[in-house]
Amino acid sequence: MNKVEITGVNTSRLKTLPESEKTRLLLLARQGDPAAREQLVSGNLRLVLSVVQKFAGRSENPDDLFQVGCIGLIKAIDHFDPAFDVRFSTYAVPMIVGEIRRYLRDNNAVRVSRSLRDTAYKAMQSREALTAELHREPSSAEIAQDIGLDERAVNEALGAIVEPVSLYEPIYSDGGDPIYVMDQIGSGVTDHDWIDEMAIKESIGLLSDREKKILSLRFLAGRTQTEVAEEIGISQAQISRLEKNAIRKIKESL
């Protein structure tokens, strides 16, 4: 994993909080204790750093991404309910990632129409609210129903603001030379191959962040369902269900 240096922050000294301490502070924060809220922020900065590291290698300033990630962390602290049957980090990471991706989209050189952007932002806000309410990632149909729009319109809007992928972006590395996107594009690619590739890419783009991560860990990193469950913080049975649902969504989209 790429090391990221943050101005004014000694990343080697960032502390982590035990789960029991997080729970105690979260309960106090929900009761309006500002000191507990501040301790939660400082005690989870390493979590923000780990997310920022996933975006290393881009042209964006890591200091900016770290600050944006902290906004996502604060939102997670303010919306998390200790009664949720998930670890705080499992809840917080998608919110931190979402905040950073929103920032990257807003600063993307590729311009999308105002109407599509408005629809996409409504959909993302709905997804965050429904995730908190349902304790899981909502489907595109549920999001569409929540904001009163057609499911296809929601999917098109969300797909329109997905940032482009560089041909030199690494997609796999086992400790040796990384494999880049361009390495997967053969010289004898036909128009039909390109259409299939674009269709698959669009289908994957409709998945939730959690579903993408599970598929990435399972089929790119070669992890077992048990290993993925331990990393994400949910049960192996839940990983199996989410993996099957993600594959089903891709098949249905294709």
Image: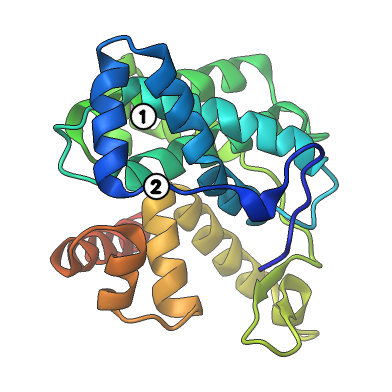
Disc 1 target residue: 127
Residue 129 as seen in the image, left or right of residue 238: right
At horizontal 45% and vertical 55% (from top left) the residue drawn is 203
Query: Which picture quadrant has residue 113?
Result: top right
At horizontal 46% and vertical 49% (from top left) the residue drawn is 16
Q: Locate residue 92, reporting x and y percent.
A: 40, 39
Disc 2 target residue: 208
Crowd around label 2: few <14 · some 14–19 · many ≥20 (10 Å): some
Q: Locate residue 59, reporting x and y percent.
A: 85, 47
Rendered-image quadrant of the N terminus: bottom right
Q: Secondary structure at mark 1?
A: helix
Tell me, yes or no, if residue 72 can be seen here. Answer: yes
Q: Locate residue 186, reporting x and y percent.
A: 75, 84
- Taking the view exactly as shown, the residue that stands out farthest to the top is 32
Q: Nearer the viewer, residue 57 or 6?
A: 6
Q: Locate residue 249, reporting x and y percent.
A: 31, 56
Q: Is residue 51 above or below residue 245?
A: above
Q: Label 2 is placed on what type of residue?
A: Ser
At horizontal 33% and vertical 36% (from top left) the residue drawn is 140
Figure coloring: rainbow
